[in-house]
Image: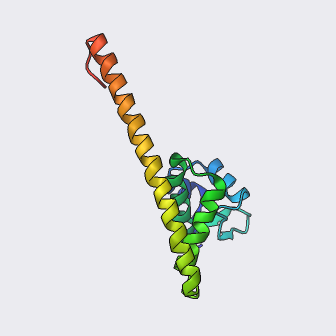
Amino acid sequence: MGGLLQIGQVAERTELSPKTIRHYDEVGLVQPSARSRGGFRLYTEADVDRLLVIRRMKPLGFTLAEMKRLLDTIAVLDDDAATTEHRAVARAELLIFRDKACESAERLRRQLAYAEEFTDLLTTRTGTARA
């Protein structure tokens, strides 16, 4: 199996559940690069990297379709055979994803600040130390 990882190992490395990884396979986001003789999914480092991209996108509210589009865009940029025109389009698309990610991250920072304000209020009202 030289260098190939089983789903449990991938789950541990990505902090995604095996069920979630199987779901991403079923919807075509990240398919295993190989199968064992027994039919078990086997993943490469590149597969793990794709799953990590998805894991980072998920809390920012990206849809499965957007995740697929971004992974395809990254693949174009990684493809040495891609034309200059395809690379330019991919870079422009990447900027759109970056802008959306920045907006989502800012929204999450605001929500976190509200949550911290609320827990501070509760801590003050209860006269206890914050956990």
User: Going by the image, does 120 lie left or right of 84?
Assistant: left
How many marks do you count on the picture? 0
Which residue appears at 70% of the width and 68% of the height? 35
Residue 84 location, x and y as percent? Answer: 54, 86
* Quadrant placement of the N terminus: bottom right
Residue 26 location, x and y as percent? Answer: 73, 57
Along the line of sight, the residue nearer the viewer: 35 or 113: 113
User: Going by the image, does 116 lie left or right of 11?
Assistant: left
Residue 56 appears anywhere in the view: yes
Q: Is residue 56 above or below residue 118?
A: below
Quadrant for residue 24, please give it.
bottom right
User: Going by the image, does 123 lie left or right of 111?
Assistant: left
In the picture as drawn, the residue positioned furthest to the top comes out as 126
Residue 2 appears anywhere in the view: no
Along the line of sight, the residue nearer the viewer: 123 or 117: 117
Residue 93 location, x and y as percent? Answer: 55, 68
Q: Is residue 110 above or below residue 118?
A: below
Q: Is residue 57 above or below residue 81?
A: above
Q: How is the image coloured?
A: rainbow
Which residue appears at 52% of the width and 60% of the height? 97
Residue 23 location, x and y as percent? Answer: 68, 52
Which residue appears at 50% of the width and 54% of the height? 100
* Quadrant placement of the C terminus: top left
Q: Is residue 87 above or below residue 124?
A: below
Which residue appears at 51% of the width and 48% of the height? 60
